[in-house]
Amino acid sequence: MNWLNLIQIIVSLLLICAILVQARGTGLSAVFGGESSIYRTKRGAEKILFFITIFLAIAFLATALANVLFRT
């Protein structure tokens, strides 16, 4: 296993964790329209976690592309 595969695995696990932490407020009631659709802004730790998730998604895409381009 080369270092690029290891980095991609680590980034993917961190991305999964970040997404699961954000999904704490959604439940089965959202499927049936029970969740309110009031717009609110992200603040504090929620905003930081949102940007970390975006960064991890971009990092995952970059490592996946690098893995394809630099395949040995």
Image (cartoon, rainbow, N blue to C red):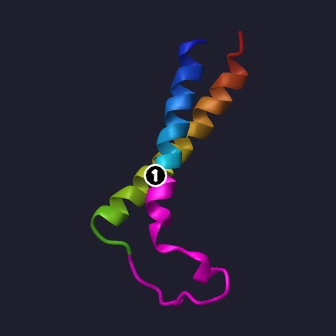
User: Which structural element holds mark 1?
Assistant: helix
Q: Locate the N terminus by quadrant.
A: top right
**What range of the chain is rendered magenta?**
18-41
Toward which corner of the image does residue 32 lie, by quadrant?
Answer: bottom right
- Is 45 magenta? The answer is no
The residue at the point 47 percent across, 41 percent down is 14
The residue at the point 56 percent across, 30 percent down is 9
- Is 36 magenta? The answer is yes
The residue at the point 27 percent across, 66 percent down is 44
Left or right of 62 on screen, residue 68 = right
Which residue type carries mark 1?
A: Ala
The residue at the point 39 percent across, 78 percent down is 41
Residue 35 rendering spot, x and y as whole percentages: 55, 87
38 and 71: which is toward the camera? 38
Q: Residue furthest front?
A: 28
Toward which corner of the image does residue 12 lie, by quadrant?
Answer: top right
Tally the numbered discs.
1
Location of residue 49 with respect to 15 vertically, above or below: below
Residue 13 rendering spot, x and y as whole percentages: 51, 39
Q: Residue furthest top?
A: 72
Which residue is tagged 1? 18
69 and 42: which is toward the camera? 42
